[in-house]
């Protein structure tokens, strides 16, 4: 759901207590719509102006930044670096947050700046203002053509978005609400009536108020006497909001975050799980983590996904045709026999015959067979034709077998690329995959002979077992190769059996690892694989010295023997716990 005005009010109140008064030490822009202000004490304030993810909150997650900062990031650094965040405020019932920042220029003259975040869906924006309220610049410039009502351009004075023309629910009296509902019209549902009447109320909250009053969400407009229950619920809700009694509440379905609110939600019953979190920052960080990963895949990896999918489909089609041709070569012995029978019966044949009836002495009882002939060829030429077809089929069988083997290896490799893309998290992950596809000829390199910019080697995921052993998990095929190649030969190497996944290294220091660490490393291998959603996954493990890469094999492809197999269940809670341990 988008961040509604009242939920945003809870966020702003929390930030005013935890972030106001702190110095801005660093400004970064990891993505086009995302700015992170690092405050004193290593607190990171995230401001996102994405159409479906607009929000503001503190975050513990570190995000990888581009090699060169965008122009808007450079502008923010020029105006805001070293400034103090004096206040964080929100115009009442507006999905707008204003950061007041006290700054000092290079001449030592103090001044004021404002950073305005508009959390309004497709109109979301991040706007930098000077001390007079003029726009210095913004993420998205809005000219007259885009919006005749309100322009957002450098040099203009900033104006709040136009009001929607609805009532303020915080100032509505009980009698006024009763009268407004009674005149809403027959046949309408109560939650729709509340949504149409008030600004700042989301559809989720409107349904929840009706549910708290009547135990159901689909309730039609009622008579005056029956409205009292809803009026009581609405009054209590008003008191909670006016007195800042907010509860950051996360709603999950099938273990995945599905929605959130600033009050406990009970309308879904057993169809969804609800959890109160300690802060709005923790709530928003948790909710948007999965969505951010999906967006990164769609935005940064779109061309990679398209290239890998196209190549995979092309190889699959080619394999299908080759297997069909190979099946057709299986009757090549019949061609040889037909040639032999023609040769054995040359004395009986005449030029121009269309067929030969002869006894097949290669089978028991010597049955009579009819062999088609080309009437334009001599008997000897007909025999030669069958022998030539036999020889060609024999050669094709050897060639096709080899090509099918190569095609199956290529198909497996491309499926591993698609699996990598589904789990890519950092910009460097996409860079590694892009390099793989370019080196393999699936993507074109940069034009004009320019070389790709040099990038540092990507780092694997790092975890720590309950016993304190380090566990490394590869992020891409090239990193998997490097991880296995650089590991101590006595370390334990793990990989899911017969399905794509990351290479996992359990560092042992030459000692025998404990069973718990081995199980946890296997669980990580299962989680970072195609078997993540499975109930039980087979994971092979062996010492690194038993793993080798065949000559000419593609990135990530290895063989190993001997090995053992463990059966584990992928568990996100375990992954999170081991990651927390790994941070130390």
Image (cartoon, grey):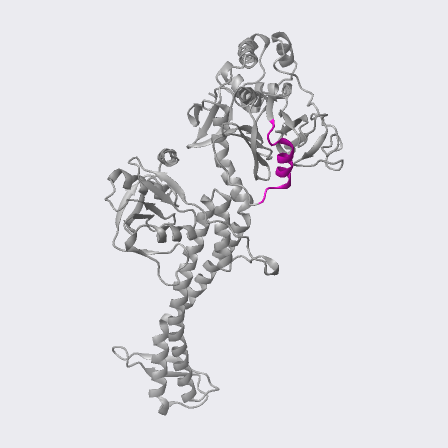
Q: Relative to 367, is 309 on the left or the right?
A: right
Check the image and report above or below for 582 versus 300. above
Task: Say which residue appears at 35% left-offset and 56% top-offset.
Answer: 558
Of residues 115 and 238, the one drawn nearer to the viewer in this rendering: 115
Q: Is residue 412 above or below residue 356?
A: above
| Residue 212 in view | yes
Q: Quadrant of the N terminus?
A: top right
Locate residue 215, reporting x and y percent: 48, 17
**What is the quadrant of residue 384 in the picture?**
bottom left
Q: Which residue is at a point 39% across and 67% down the rendered structure image? A: 402
Q: Position of residue 59 (x, y in %)?
A: 50, 30
Q: Position of residue 429 (x, y in %)?
A: 48, 46
Residue 187 seen in the figure: no
Q: How many marks?
A: 0
Residue occupying image coordinates x 39% and y 80%? 371
Q: Nearer the viewer, residue 240 or 19?
A: 19
Report the side of 370 relative to 546 (left or right): right
Q: Main secondary structure of the magenta part?
A: helix
Residue 247: horizontal and vertical position, in percent? 49, 19
Residue at the left extreme of this rendering: 512
Residue 74 belongs to magenta span: yes
Report if residue 36 lies within the magenta region. Answer: no
The residue stretch that appears in magenta: 68-83
Farthest residue toward the bottom?
A: 347
214 vs 156, nearest the viewer = 156
Residue drawn at the location 57% of the way across and 22% of the way down: 21
- Which quadrant is home to the C terminus? top left
């Amino acid at each position: 759901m988008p961040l509604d005005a009242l939920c945003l009010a809870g966020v702003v109140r929390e930030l005013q207590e935890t972030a106001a008064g702190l110095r801005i030490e660093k400004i970064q822009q990891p993505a086009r719509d995302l700015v992170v202000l690092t405050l004193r004490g290593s607190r990171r304030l995230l401001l996102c102006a994405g159409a479906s993810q607009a929000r503001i909150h503190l975050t513990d997650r570190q995000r990888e930044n581009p090699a060169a900062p965008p122009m808007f990031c450079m502008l923010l650094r020029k105006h805001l670096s070293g400034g103090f965040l004096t206040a964080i405020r929100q115009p009442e019932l507006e999905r707008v947050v204003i950061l007041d920042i006290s700054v000092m220029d290079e001449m030592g003259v103090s001044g004021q700046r404002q950073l305005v975040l508009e959390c309004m869906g497709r109109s979301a924006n991040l706007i930098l203002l000077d001390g007079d309220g003029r726009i210095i610049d913004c993420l998205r410039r809005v000219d007259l053509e885009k919006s005749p009502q309100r322009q957002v351009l450098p040099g203009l004075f900033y104006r709040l978005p136009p009001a929607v023309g609805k009532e303020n629910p915080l100032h509505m009296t009980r009698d006024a609400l009763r009268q407004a509902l009674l005149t809403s019209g027959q046949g309408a549902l109560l939650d729709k009536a509340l949504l149409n009447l008030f600004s700042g109320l989301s559809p989720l909250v409107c349904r929840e108020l009706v549910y708290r009053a009547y135990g159901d969400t689909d309730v039609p407009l009622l008579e005056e006497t029956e409205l009292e229950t809803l009026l009581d619920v609405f009054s209590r809700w008003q008191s909670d909001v006016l007195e800042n009694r907010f509860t950051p509440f996360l709603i999950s379905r099938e273990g995945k975050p599905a929605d959130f609110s600033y009050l406990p939600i009970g309308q879904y019953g057993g169809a969804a799980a609800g959890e109160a979190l300690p802060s709005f920052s923790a709530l928003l960080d948790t909710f948007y983590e999965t969505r951010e990963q999906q967006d990164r895949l769609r935005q940064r990896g779109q061309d990679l996904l398209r290239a890998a999918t196209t190549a995979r489909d092309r190889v699959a089609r080619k394999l299908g045709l080759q297997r069909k041709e190979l099946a057709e070569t299986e009757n090549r012995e019949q061609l040889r026999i037909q040639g032999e029978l023609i040769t054995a019966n040359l004395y009986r044949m005449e030029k121009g015959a269309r067929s030969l009836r002869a006894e097949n002495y290669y089978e028991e009882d010597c049955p009579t067979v009819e062999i088609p002939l080309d009437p334009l060829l001599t008997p000897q030429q007909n025999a030669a034709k069958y022998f030539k077809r036999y020889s060609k089929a024999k050669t094709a069988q050897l060639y096709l077998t080899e090509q099918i083997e190569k095609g199956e290896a290529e198909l497996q490799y491309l499926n591993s690329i698609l699996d990598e893309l589904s789990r890519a998290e950092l910009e460097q992950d996409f860079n590694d995959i892009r390099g793989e596809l370019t080196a393999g000829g699936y993507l074109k390199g940069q034009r004009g002979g320019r070389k790709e910019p040099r990038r540092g080697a990507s780092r694997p995921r790092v975890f720590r077992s309950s016993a304190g052993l380090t566990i490394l998990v590869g992020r891409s095929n090239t990193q998997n190769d490097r991880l296995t190649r650089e590991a101590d030969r006595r370390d334990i190497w793990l990989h899911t059996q017969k399905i794509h996944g990351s290479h996992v290294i359990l560092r042992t220091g030459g000692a025998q690892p404990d069973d718990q660490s081995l199980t946890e490393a296997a669980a990580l291998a299962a989680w970072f694989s195609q078997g993540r959603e499975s109930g039980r996954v087979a994971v092979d493990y062996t010492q690194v010295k038993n793993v080798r890469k065949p000559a000419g094999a593609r990135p990530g492809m290895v063989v190993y023997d001997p090995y053992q197999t463990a059966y584990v269940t992928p568990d996100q809670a375990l992954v999170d716990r081991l990651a927390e341990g790994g941070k130390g």
